[in-house]
Image (cartoon, grey):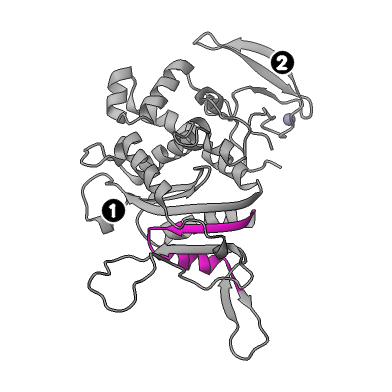
């Protein structure tokens, strides 16, 4: 599977000829292809975010950049004189690529990954007590590459955590050694354990022990002050569940923390206006908030060079050879479910 190939939307074949060309309102020339397999005719923008858009690409690029550099939707609409629905439509179209890109990333194989995980919080629609807010956002980031595996918002409930751990379980499938470090809730460890455990049979009597699968470790932060407590000092992080006896990761002694993720979270507050503190530019609902997150996910992973690593995270992780431009993203075909 290649990300930038143009396939026939009907039979998914790559083999095609140029049938004719046409000019769009902005003056750009586009092609209609003829599929050699099923003789279907299709435009080069079929199934891409660009299909059906009439605004020229340069304007769309400027607006997408402003939105992902901290400008609010209202301010963007006033500055560029576009309607809010138009901007939302572009965000949705670009965001629809996330599924394809994530699937592509999940098809790769990895030797080892350190994933940092945490939640951050923003208001949605109106002020509510934190516990009732729908603006909880779980972020899971691979440390060395800064690749974001998961970026999803919602109520802080079982589903939000289970969804995130489902993604980790998927990554575990294609990774030889994986560590998950979190400053967030203990639930991460427990839920991952629910999904990825093995039953160790030792031949001894009694119920066989359950452990995490081999070469996976989890460390969660011990929360709360220790100042007034008696007894030996607790470790800063602890393993919430037993690990597989053959796991060699713990001895590798890599630093246990989620500092890089903390840096990402403050960047997110700077870059997405709906995550800024003391703001009144809340997202209207979780669906709109998630739409912003999907686009931010694409920008962060595939388009923008990371400030510290000087690399685009998807390149640093080794899943693509080079970064994409916003224009290239708009020209990428969204994977159809019937794809081979
Ligand atoms: Zn075809």
Given the current orientation, which residue lies at the most extreme bottom position? 205
Q: Position of residue 24 (x, y in %)?
A: 54, 12
Q: Position of residue 172 (x, y in %)?
A: 60, 57
Q: Residues within 10 Å of mark 2 (few under 14, many from 20)?
A: few
The magenta-colored residue range is 175-198
Question: In which quadrant of this rendering is ligand 1 seen?
Answer: top right
Left or right: residue 167 compared with residue 110: left
Left or right: residue 173 compared with residue 84: right
Determine which residue is flagged by label 1.
Answer: 133
- For this rendering, which residue is in front, 76 or 42? 76
Is 186 colored magenta in this rendering? Answer: yes
Residue, x 45% and y 39% (percent of image)?
Answer: 294
Disc 2 to disc 1, C-alpha distance: 53 Å
Is 169 colored magenta in this rendering? Answer: no
- For this rendering, which residue is in front, 314 or 248? 248
**Image quarter of the C terminus:** top right
Q: Quadrant of residue 333?
A: top right
Q: Residues within 10 Å of mark 1 (few under 14, many from 20)?
A: some
Q: Position of residue 337 (x, y in %)?
A: 63, 43
Determine which residue is flagged by label 2.
Answer: 19
Q: Quadrant of residue 65?
A: top left
In the displayed structure, 289 sits above or below 161; it is: above
Q: Position of residue 174 (x, y in %)?
A: 64, 53
Q: Between disc 2 and disc 1, whose residue precedes?
A: 2
Residue, x 32% and y 36% (percent of image)?
Answer: 270
Mark 1, secondary structure of its residue: loop
């Amino acid at each position: 599977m290649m990300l930038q190939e143009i396939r026939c939307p009907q039979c998914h074949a790559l083999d095609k000829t140029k049938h004719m060309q046409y000019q769009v309102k902005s003056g750009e020339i586009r092609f209609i292809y003829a599929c050699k397999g099923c003789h279907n005719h299709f435009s080069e923008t079929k199934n891409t975010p660009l299909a059906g858009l009439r605004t020229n690409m340069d304007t769309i690029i400027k607006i997408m950049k402003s939105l992902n550099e901290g400008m609010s939707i209202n301010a963007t609409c006033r500055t560029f004189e576009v309607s809010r629905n138009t901007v939302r439509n572009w965000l949705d179209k670009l965001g629809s690529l996330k599924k394809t890109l994530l699937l592509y990333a999940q098809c790769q194989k990895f030797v080892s990954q350190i994933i940092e995980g945490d939640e951050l919080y923003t208001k949605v629609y109106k002020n509510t007590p934190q516990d009732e807010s729908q603006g909880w956002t779980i972020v899971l980031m691979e440390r060395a590459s800064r690749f974001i595996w998961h970026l999803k918002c919602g109520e802080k409930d079982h589903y939000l955590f289970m969804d995130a751990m489902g993604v980790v379980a998927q990554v575990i499938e294609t990774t030889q050694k994986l560590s998950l470090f979190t400053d967030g809730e203990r639930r991460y460890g427990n839920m991952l354990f629910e999904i990825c455990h093995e039953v160790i049979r030792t031949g001894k009597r009694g119920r066989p022990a359950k452990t995490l699968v081999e070469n996976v470790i989890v460390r969660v932060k011990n929360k709360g002050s220790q100042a007034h407590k008696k007894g030996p000092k607790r470790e800063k992080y602890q393993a919430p569940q037993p690990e597989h006896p053959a796991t060699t990761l713990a001895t590798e002694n890599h630093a246990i923390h989620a500092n890089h993720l903390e840096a990402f979270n403050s960047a997110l507050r700077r870059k997405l206006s709906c995550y800024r503190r003391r703001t009144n530019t809340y997202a209207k609902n979780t669906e709109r908030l998630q739409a912003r997150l999907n686009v931010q996910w694409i920008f962060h992973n595939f388009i923008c060079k990371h400030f510290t690593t000087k690399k685009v995270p998807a390149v640093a992780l080794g899943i693509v050879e080079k970064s994409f431009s916003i224009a290239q993203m708009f020209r990428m075909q969204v994977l159809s479910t019937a794809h081979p």
